[in-house]
Image (cartoon, rainbow, N blue to C red):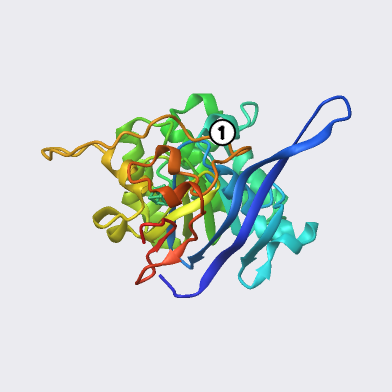
Amino acid sequence: MLNHKLLEARDLKKYYPVTGGLLSRHRGDVKAVDGVSFFIKEGETLGLVGESGCGKSTLGRTILRLEEPTEGEIIYRGTDVTRLDKKALRELRREVQIIFQDPQSSLDPRMTVGRSIGEALLIQGLGDELERGQKVAEMLVQVGLEGQHAARYPHEFSSGQRQRIGIARALAVEPRLIIADEPVSALDVSVQAQILNLMLDLRQEFGLAYLFIAHDLAVIREISHRIAVMYLGRIAEMAGVKPIFENALHPYTEALLSAIPQVGRKKTRLLLPGSVPSPLNPPPGCRFHPRCHRVMPVCSQEEPVLKDVGGGHLVACHLY
Ligand code: SF4
């Protein structure tokens, strides 16, 4: 892993205005991402974890400007992505690829797999027809399939194989960073492990960086160098894998960790009451306070800021 920052988000926000009434007045904003800052180094994997509805997928899409950011900066290799014109944005989308949870929906069922992967090359103006065909076959082999699979359609593959095809398509344009949005959540546990191993191998071989989004800390642990825990549009805690698993500070992280089954070890599961509140009306003070097992009077009054408590371990909680 190199030490250069490949991507940096600075106070990134993505709000969706809510209108209502006869005059369609602005009633408020769904604050899906509300002031998020982080960086990813070359070749590094940042795991982004949180319950569904915490804003992690929106964050991934906003980095690529599949959703336009409301505020903040996204610095990719020294350039602010939020200011890129169409041409420069296309170049960015070659270097930063995204893979989705459901490969079924991201592959056109009417296109052969070869055409789907080749299209990614065509959009980027890479190679002639012959070269594109060769690249497609090469990528399929790279992800553990066969070159001849290019002539088949997505429905002829298992869900795990389809995710391999999704990865091949992302890889074909030689990206530096892959945003992987719940890439193994829809797969059986044994297939999950295969896809995670494939992603680890590809990271090693191509020096890829990943923003790996998942709701499952056990999955995130396998692949990440650092982990960011997101709650209701903000980062609650961010640190290396070891500090998160051995010395989690934020009560939300503690609760997520306590939900991971561990063979042969008795531990108390911290129940998280209710679900993530609406980002339209986040609770005042600490957003987590209605569900927190360590809540204090100050928690409903003041919003804690994310601060470094030593060694790059960041936490947003009044306990620290
Ligand atoms: Fe819990 Fe208070 Fe910390 Fe929020 S600030 S996580 S409510 S202890």
Q: Position of residue 68 (x, y in %)?
A: 72, 50
Q: How many marks?
A: 1
On the image, numbered disc 1 is attached to which residue? 151
Residue 262 visible: yes
Looking at the picture, tell me which residue is in the foreground, 78 or 206.
78
Which quarter of the image is occupied by the N terminus? bottom left
Residue 75's quadrant in the figure? Answer: bottom right
Residue occupying the point 79% across, 56% down:
86
Q: Is residue 222 left or right of residue 62?
A: left
**Residue 10 drawn above or below residue 260:** below
Looking at the picture, tell me which residue is in the foreground, 276 or 72.
276
Q: Secondary structure at mark 1?
A: helix
Q: Position of residue 27 (x, y in %)?
A: 76, 36
* Residue type, label 1: Ala
**Residue 75 drawn above or below residue 160:** below
**Residue 127 drawn above or below residue 32:** below
Q: Which residue reaches farthest bottom? A: 3
Which quarter of the image is occupied by the C terminus? bottom left
Looking at the picture, tell me which residue is in the foreground, 227 or 209.
227
Q: Position of residue 180 (x, y in %)?
A: 50, 47
Q: Position of residue 311 (x, y in %)?
A: 35, 72
